[in-house]
Image (cartoon, helix red, strand yellow):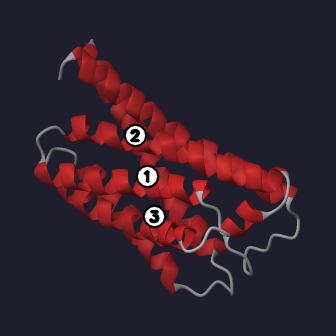
């Protein structure tokens, strides 16, 4: 990899670490601003249509987190280099990142765009992980491959568990699995980009 690629991989890796931290920080701040929120009765997106700072915090967190995830996802193309399955997985993940951004841009009261964006986001993440996990297993990154598959399984299986009338809990658990994967891979990209340039 050349210097330009290394710099982009480091920027993308840093974005992968920061995206979930920023998104969840803003979501938790929005929840703190809205005491009526119920984990078993609400969806997280209900926060995005409340008056005042609650909606601003929630939607801003998703938009900023989504943009950072787009940067992270595009960097996967360089990180995976010539791996065809990895490129497919990275492309699906880019689309997933756009869907995350769209959830914040088009709040719950913008129908049906918000609904479609949400479904696409929670569907494309495990889908992209299947491609990326297989790509990692076919290279020397076997541990990362198994971890990617675990993240995909968790992100999908939480939707089969009844947590109540609302979907806030499966949304959060699915997003947390995606976030852990993003942080772990982001740190790995940061390290590899730094070592390759030395």
Q: Is residue 184 visible?
A: yes
For label 3, the crowd category at 10 Å Cα-Cα, with few meaning under 14, some 14 to 19 and many 20 or more, is many
Q: Quadrant of the N terminus?
A: top left
Residue 99 in percent (x, y) is at 46, 58
Q: In which quarter of the image is the C terminus?
A: top left
Q: At 52% across and 52% down in the image, what residue appears?
A: 101
For residue 112, which quarter of the picture?
bottom right
**Location of mark 1 (residue):** 97
Residue shown at 26% from the left, 18% from the top:
4
Q: Which mark is residue 121?
A: 3
With respect to residue 123, does 59 lie above or below? above
How far is the residue under mark 1 from the one under mark 3?
A: 7 Å
Q: Quick check: 172 above or below 62?
A: below
Disc 2 target residue = 72
Instruction: Pick whichever, 171 or 103, lies toward us.
Output: 103
- 44 versus 55 height, above or below: below
Report crowding for label 2: few under 14, some 14 to 19, many 20 or more residues within 10 A (C-alpha): many
Mark 3 in CB contact with mark 2 (< 8 angstroms): no
Q: Are marks 1 and 2 in contact (CB under 8 Å)?
A: yes
Coordinates of residue 129 in the picture (x, y in percent)? 31, 60
């Amino acid at each position: 990899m050349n210097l330009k690629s290394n710099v982009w991989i480091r920027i993308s890796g840093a974005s992968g670490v920061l995206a979930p931290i920023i998104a969840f920080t803003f979501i938790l701040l929005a929840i703190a601003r809205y005491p009526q929120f119920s984990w078993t009765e609400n969806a997280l997106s209900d926060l995005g249509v409340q008056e005042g700072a609650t909606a601003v915090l929630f939607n801003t967190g998703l938009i900023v987190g989504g943009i950072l995830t787009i940067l992270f996802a595009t960097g996967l193309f360089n990180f995976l280099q010539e791996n065809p399955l990895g490129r497919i997985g990275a492309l699906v993940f880019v689309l997933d990142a756009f869907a995350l951004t769209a959830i914040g841009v088009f709040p719950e009261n913008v129908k049906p765009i918000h609904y479609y964006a949400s479904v696409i986001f929670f569907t494309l993440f495990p889908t992209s992980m299947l491609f990326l996990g297989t790509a990692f297993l076919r290279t020397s990154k076997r541990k990362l491959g198994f971890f990617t598959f675990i993240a995909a399984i968790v992100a999908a299986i939480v939707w089969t568990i009844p947590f109540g009338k609302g979907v806030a809990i499966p949304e959060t658990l699915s997003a947390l699995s995606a976030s852990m994967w993003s942080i772990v891979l982001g740190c790995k990209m940061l390290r590899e980009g730094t070592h390759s340039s030395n």
